[in-house]
Amino acid sequence: MSLTLETMLRALPPDMPPWEAGTEGERDKVASLRDRDGGAGPLSRGYAWQKWLTRYLRENGPNVASGFGVDTGVPSDRMDRKGYVAPQAEFAVGYVETDVAASRDTRVRDAAKGTGYVFGAALYDHRGGDVTDPVVAEFIPVGSPGAGIQLPVVRLVAAEVLHAPDPSNATAACWASDARTHMMPNRVLTAKHAVNGLAPGDNVAMADGSMGQLVTFCPAGVDAAMIECGARRPAPVPLDIDPDPAVGEEVSFHGAVSGTVSGRITRTWIFPDNSSAYDAHRIHLDETGKAGDSGALLRLKSDRRAVGLYTGIKHGRSTQTGMAQAIWQVTDLLGLDLHE
């Protein structure tokens, strides 16, 4: 379901949350969004609520999840069939699609205001079950008692469909080099699940018929890998990244199969002060790609800064969203400079 500015304005709480930018990066982001919508529009207001709710769930998430009978505190200690360590459940903050006709909670229907979205958080439950189970929600009060603002947390029985073709049919995001040595880049970044089963040093078939070599990949649930190629980028241009994209911002990626796909960020789970691989940073968008697009570079339309690597589809109830690995976490874990 496409996310529009009108939907964002209707679904957002009317006031600003009790949150202030605490880092230089957050202050720069606030200033940028204020320039674009005047400071009270859906991007500025949505970003402030996104940051408030992310901070709240970082501190109180296990208690919120326990209300659904879900343990988010202990990720699995084994690789799943998709090639990375998966949690039982994970949060994402922003605009959550909900089939309000199936919801048994009138507050969910009221919060959606006829848009098909609520602003709050999704708790993706990966333990299995019927994906058509009715929406179950908890509500987080904001401000003093009686303030009247409550943000829903909607549990969605979820499954992931990672676009995992042969590596030769994946999509390279960009060139990459070691940030410590600043060598001429001859490595490309892609999705880790596209090289599932390979170990560092193994050969990787490339789409142009050449042979690359898997250099490394991110640990645990972070879905990114680096492949060394025979060719080098002759005149590398630094690729700027935005470590903290706002919900509602327009994005696009160019997949090897789908070509250019454009949409909006619906929700995120990102905190640029901690890149722990056991809490994977994710971006969700209202459009999806196809098998072979995995690894494509997700960029903001406003300034072309990179925000993620497209990885596949997240299913939850009757809806599905595109899914991407946040790129800031990848560069921090692997110590990379990115180029185009």
Image (cartoon, rainbow, N blue to C red):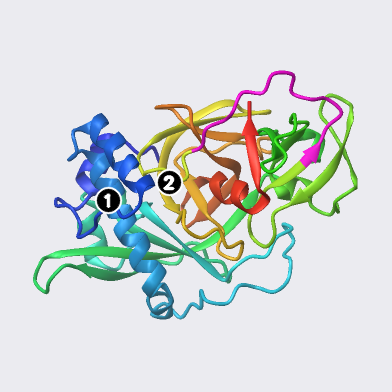
Task: Tell me where residue 9 appears, x and y as whole percent.
Answer: 21, 42
Q: Is residue 322 above or below residue 293?
A: below
Residue 171: name its quadrant: top right
Specify the label residue 48 is tagged with. Answer: 1
The residue lying furthest to the left in this view is 146
Residue kind at label 1, given as amino acid type = Ala
Residue 213 among those drawn in magenta: no
The residue located at (63%, 54%) in the rendering is 333
Main SS type for the magenta part?
Answer: loop
Q: Is 163 drawn above or below residue 156 in the view shown?
A: above
In this view, the residue in front, 112 or 331, is 331
Q: How many marks?
A: 2
Q: Is residue 294 left or right of residue 306?
A: right
How far separated are the C-alphas under marks 2 and 1? 12 Å
In x, y percent, where is residue 119?
29, 54
Q: Residue at x 63, y 38 (%)?
A: 337
Viewer can see residue 132: yes
Q: Residue at x 68, y 28 (%)?
A: 256
- Viewer-closest of 313 and 72: 72
Quadrant position of residue 250: top left
Most foreground residue, 71 or 223? 223
106 lies left or right of 265: left
Q: Residue furthest front?
A: 181
Q: Amino acid at mark 2?
A: Asp
Is there a contact, CB below 8 Å, between mark 2 and mark 1? Answer: no
Badge 2 marks a residue whose secondary structure is: loop
Q: Is 248 on the left or on the right of 279, as rendered?
A: left
Residue 340 on image: x %, y %: 63, 25
Q: Which residue is mark 2?
A: 244
Q: Nearer the viewer, residue 281 or 328?
A: 328
SS for callout 1: helix
